[in-house]
Image (cartoon, grey):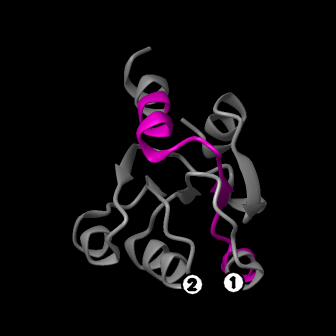
Amino acid sequence: MKLREIAERLDLQVLAGERGLDREVNSGYCTDLISDFMANGTPGCLWLTLQTHMNVVAVALLAGAAGVVLTGGRGIPPEVCRKAEAEGLPLLHTSFNTFEIAGRLYHLLYAQ
């Protein structure tokens, strides 16, 4: 499913990387540990995390993630959004916690 459709159906706010919303999302991955995502994130996955620091952008790019959803409604530093935009990485935001948005994403990707 295209990231654009996921963003619309889950009411995710696009913070950066809008030009990358046509990427295919083949799975989701939930973790707040950078090292865990580095070891286990896969190309095309959508990373769900509450982490909002600059390393999230770098690691998502390294892993080939389709995008990142920042969960829990936390504030996002403007420099993180600028970096994601410059790199073309879709960065999305939701007030839902990780558990809630993961369930909704799972339903969209697998329960149809």
Rendered position, 76 above or below 74 = below
Rendered position, 9 above or below 85 = above
Residue at 38% x, 72% y: name it.
Answer: 63
Q: Residue furthest top?
A: 112
Local SS, label 2: loop
Query: In the drawing, does residue 55 fall left or right of residue 79?
Result: left
Residue that carries the numbered disc 1 in the rendered image: 83
In which quadrant of the rendered image does the C terminus lie?
A: top left
Residue 106's x, y, as percent?
A: 40, 30
Disc nearer the start of the sequence (1/2): 2
Query: In the drawing, does residue 93 fall left or right of residue 56?
Result: right
Q: Which one is nearer the viewer's eye here, 98 or 112? A: 98
Residue 54's x, y, as percent?
A: 57, 84
Q: Which one is nearer the viewer's eye here, 60 or 102? A: 102
- Nearer to us of marks 1 and 2 is 2
Check if mark 1's residue and mark 2's residue have beta carbons within 8 Å: yes
Amino acid type at circle 2 is Met
Query: In the drawing, does residue 83 fall left or right of residue 32?
Result: right
The picture quadrant where one finds residue 52 is bottom right
Residue at 39% x, 17% y: name it.
Answer: 111
Q: Which one is nearer the viewer's eye here, 50 or 104? A: 50
C-alpha span from label 1 to label 2:
8 Å
Residue at 75% x, 49% y: name it.
Answer: 13
Rendered position, 106 above or below 32 = above
Query: From which residue to which does the magenta span run?
Result: 82-104
Residue 31's x, y, as percent?
A: 34, 59
Residue that carries the numbered disc 2 in the rendered image: 54
Amino acid type at circle 1 is Lys
Instruction: Tell me if residue 66 is in the magenta stretch.
Output: no
Q: Which mark is residue 33?
A: none
